Amino acid sequence: MITRRYSIRSLAAGGLLLPGVLQEMMRGAPLRSPTAANPLAPRQPHFPGKARRVIFLFMTGGVCHVDTFDPKPFLTANHGKGVGRRNFYKGSDWQFRKYGQSGIEVSDLFPHIGGVIDDIAVIRSMKNINGDHFGATIGIHTGSATFNRPSIGSWISYGLGTENQNLPSFMVIAPELPYAGGQVFGSDFLPVLHQGTRIVPGPEPISNMARRSPSAEVQKTELDMVEYFNRQHLQSREGDSNLPARIQSFETAFGMQVQAPEAFDISKESDATLKLYGLERGATKGFGWQCLVARRMAERGVRFVELIDGGTSIDYNWDAHAHMSNYNRLAPRVDRPIAGLIRDLKSRGMFDDTIVVWTTEFGRTPTVPDPTAEGRGHHAKVYCSWVAGGGFKGGMVYGASDERGFDVAENAVSVHDLQATILNQLGLDHTRLTYRHAGRDYRLTDVHGRVVNEILV
């Protein structure tokens, strides 16, 4: 049997270990300095927050608000009628029905989400800062529509750290990358350890998770050696803030080999739980799998989990330029799993301290250039998002668009407002969560943002 002590002696005999290193490793002395900063250590928030974690559901492509969560009888009544010289009103292809005690109207596309609407605060007055996919996607994620900036998940990781040192604080479950690619979960100028770790659903969600060393003891010895030399390197470069993060990433990766496979293994979940998410036993893909794994990650201390539905192909995302009928295929994939996630969190006592966010980059136009058009164009002036759990009110609608669904009629909510409110529920003041870079202090909300207190308990 190959043991740790045997490995160390073999390396020493081969002249691969210097005497000082050998002495430290043989006596089991900790190579990490007791005072060394851990970028992922749990941090106290600015004030007591209602929530501890976030599950962020992002629908790529721009989900049409007037076909999902913002009913417009005016459009239905005036379908096909001209407006101006070149446009025509387009009514929804789906009916809206009232759900729950709140009576909030939801499209027939989302009957399961309608079933949990009393737990949800629907925002019908969202505005984004850009009308193209790239700018709007990074806008909702980073607060900037033009320049690379850290994503909201990275900011929350930086502000709060993680509750589990063996898993990343920020994980992204994405079969495909959305518009803007990895920028939506990048850390930019924040230490790299706060960047989102991408999970690709399938038999091997994270590559290279299996140990390649002949035993855990040998691997631990190898990592101890790497740790020792990294610390020596760091001592002469203490001004480099990225080095501690890179060193910590080795330790997180080692811990992930133990805990991540178990977190992805849903085989021990009950039949009732799998049914809740619309999953067949043995499944390793689908939005139901993403939602169930997100709950398991949240249970295990991951601070921010983002689920991305759809990539850049308009045939497989919510970018319905040509055919709104694609929603008949897209909506059922996510409807039951999302409702199941909310019900599951509630049954486990996690709902009150977990924020669930459902959003997209913008809405779709209420008018079309041809009365026979089956699709809709981009529309960033007003659209819908919703939030649940984590101290948000349930069974309410906040804000409104005008009767056409063209512009905000009351209580506009910008992407910065939404970001500020999410941070607030985690106990973070968006004006104080800053990072010094290039001679100035940056924050997620830039110089904007207000906490939308009206939707908070």
Image (tube, rainbow, N blue to C red):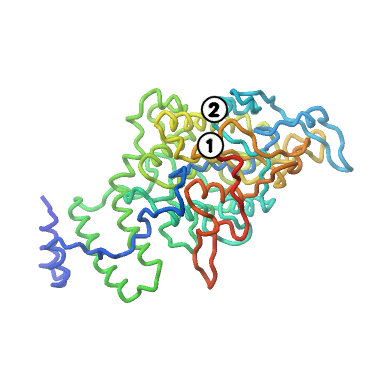
Which quadrant holds residue 393? top right
What element does badge 2 sit on? Answer: loop
Q: Residue at x 35, y 73 (%)?
A: 238
Residue corresponding to mark 1: 388
Does the residue at mark 2 contact the one at mark 1 (Cβ under 8 Å)? yes
The amino acid type of the residue labelled 1 equals Ala
What element does badge 1 sit on? Answer: strand
Q: Residue at x 33, y 54 (%)?
A: 252
Q: Which residue is at the far bottom? A: 236
* Dot 2 alpha-carbon crowd within 10 angstroms: few under 14, some 14 to 19, many 20 or more: some
Residue 295 sits above or below residue 185 on the image: above
Q: What's the mark number on residue 116?
A: 2
Residue 180 sits above or below residue 305 on the image: below
Asked if one can make out residue 173 in the rendered structure from this viewpoint, the answer is no
The amino acid type of the residue labelled 2 equals Val
Residue 415 sits above or below residue 329 on the image: below
Asked if one can make out residue 382 in the rendered structure from this viewpoint, the answer is yes
Which quadrant holds residue 431? bottom right
Quick one: 210 or 18, which is closer to the camera?
18
Quick one: 357 or 226, which is closer to the camera?
357
Quarter of the figure with the C terminus: top right
User: Residue 98, percent across and down?
Assistant: 65, 23
* Dot 1 alpha-carbon crowd within 10 angstroms: few under 14, some 14 to 19, many 20 or more: many
Q: What's the mark number on residue 369?
A: none
Sequence-wise first label, 2 or 1: 2
Is residue 215 rendered to the left or right of residue 260?
Answer: left
User: Residue 354, percent across and down?
Assistant: 46, 40
Residue 416 sits above or below residue 370 on the image: below
Q: What is the spatial separation of the Cα atoms under label 2 and label 1, in whole angstroms?
A: 10 Å
